[in-house]
């Protein structure tokens, strides 16, 4: 068996077309969905991510503002700028690109963003809404994973899902989203004594630890669905995920590639969240 690819680029394109149509409908009512992206410092990876986010917004007909600040910006200055964006009626989503310089408390900045504009889904109010099954913004990467499972018509009810990783950005929210769809969920991490014993039981595996080859073919039950959230570099410097793709694709039924899998979906779900924030504001 060779796994079918879940193509993040193709699915993203489809969803972005829907976003563009809904944005056009809002514009007809006099509202242009607006996203503010705030970048502090010169982190090269952050600059690439930010550029991609701004371009995706513009391509989908959303209004995007990129604010770049020197790494010497103080925490107080950044908090004041976030407050200004909270009060700007033309801005529906606020994204402060992480990581921030060490002298700035990232959590404090995230909590300063209005929950109504928290399109990254990182605010404690968004986390609480996800935890309790209330409406709110879902973090973009796990939200994208859920859309990928939906795209293959996968019914999670009664399935065993294993999430490798427990970050606030992917692992924990991913587990909660899977739970909402009635999966039985196991979260594994660096202190899990026998990862292979866990993953061999899984119908769905989400690998999200940022470590190459954390999941190999001998750790996967035949026919399992594997979503690779990792972003690493191999020995040749090429982009790769957390999963040993060449080995695992011979065992799994579906697998996401890196690049071209979960990555494009993350930005797409940011657009979806921004659009929904604008629709809420318009109503």
Image (cartoon, rainbow, N blue to C red):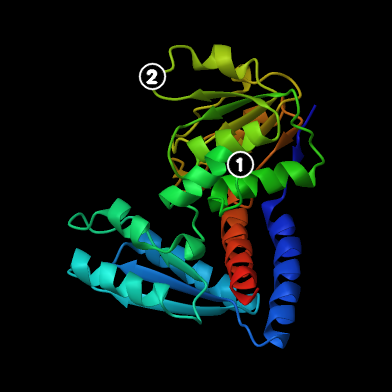
Task: Decide if residue 257 is on the left or right side of residue 92.
Answer: right
Which type of secondary structure does the marked residue at label 1 adopt?
A: loop
Looking at the picture, does residue 159 appear above or below residue 254?
above
User: 175 or 83, which lies in front?
Assistant: 83
> Residues at badges 1 and 2 in contact (C-beta under 8 Å)?
no
| Residue 77 rendering spot, x and y as whole percentages | 22, 72
Relative placement, left or right, of 207 versus 158 is: left
Which of the two labelled residues, at mark 1 and mark 2, occupies the earlier sequence position? 1
Residue in the picture at 59% in, 77% down? 33
Q: Secondary structure at mark 2?
A: loop
Between 238 and 261, the residue placed more toward the observer is: 261
Mark 1 vs mark 2, CA separation in Å: 28 Å
Q: What residue is shown at x 82% (from left), y 41% (from top)?
A: 153
Residue 121 seen anywhere in this rendered image of the structure: yes
The residue located at (39%, 75%) in the rendering is: 85
Which numbered tag is attached to residue 164? none
In this view of the protein, can residue 231 be seen by the observer?
no
| Quadrant where the C terminus is found in the figure | bottom right
Neighbourhood count class around disc 2 (C-alpha, 10 Å): few under 14, some 14–19, many 20 upward: few
The crowding category of the residue bearing disc 1, from other C-alpha atoms within 10 Å (few below 14, some 14 to 19, many at least 20), is few
- Is residue 244 shown left or right of residue 223? left
Residue 219 to residue 27: above or below: above
Q: Is residue 256 left or right of residue 140?
A: right
Q: Quadrant of residue 79?
A: bottom left
Nearer the camera: disc 1 or disc 2: 1
> What residue would you read off at disc 2?
191
Where does the N terminus fall, quadrant-wise?
A: top right
Question: Could you say which disc has been placed on residue 133 in the image?
Answer: 1
């Amino acid at each position: 068996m060779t796994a079918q690819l879940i193509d993040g680029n193709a699915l993203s394109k489809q969803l972005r077309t829907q976003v563009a149509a809904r944005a056009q409908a809002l514009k007809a009512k006099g509202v242009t969905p607006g996203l503010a992206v705030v970048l502090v410092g010169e982190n090269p990876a952050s600059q690439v991510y930010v550029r991609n986010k701004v371009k995706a917004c513009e391509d989908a007909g959303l209004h995007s503002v990129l604010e770049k600040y020197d790494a010497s910006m103080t925490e107080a200055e950044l908090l004041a700028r976030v407050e200004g964006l909270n009060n700007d009626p033309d801005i529906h989503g606020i994204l402060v690109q992480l990581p921030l310089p060490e002298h700035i408390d990232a959590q404090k900045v995230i909590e300063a963003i209005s929950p109504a504009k928290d399109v990254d889904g990182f605010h404690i109010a968004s986390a609480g809404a996800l935890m309790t099954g209330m409406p709110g913004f879902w973090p973009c990467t796990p939200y994208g994973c859920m859309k990928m499972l939906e795209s293959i018509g996968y019914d999670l009810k009664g399935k065993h899902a294993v999430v490798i990783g427990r970050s606030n950005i992917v692992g924990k929210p991913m587990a909660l989203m899977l739970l909402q769809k009635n999966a039985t969920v196991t979260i594994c991490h660096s202190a899990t004594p026998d990862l292979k014993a866990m993953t061999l039981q899984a119908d769905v595996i989400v690998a999200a630890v940022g470590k190459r080859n954390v999941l190999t073919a001998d750790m996967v039950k035949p026919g399992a669905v594997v979503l690779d959230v990792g972003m690493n570099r191999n020995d040749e410097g090429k982009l790769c995920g957390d999963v040993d793709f060449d080995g695992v694709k011979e065992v799994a039924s579906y697998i996401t590639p890196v690049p071209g899998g979960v990555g494009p979906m993350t930005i797409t779900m940011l657009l979806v969240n921004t659009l929904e924030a604008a629709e809420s504001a318009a109503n």
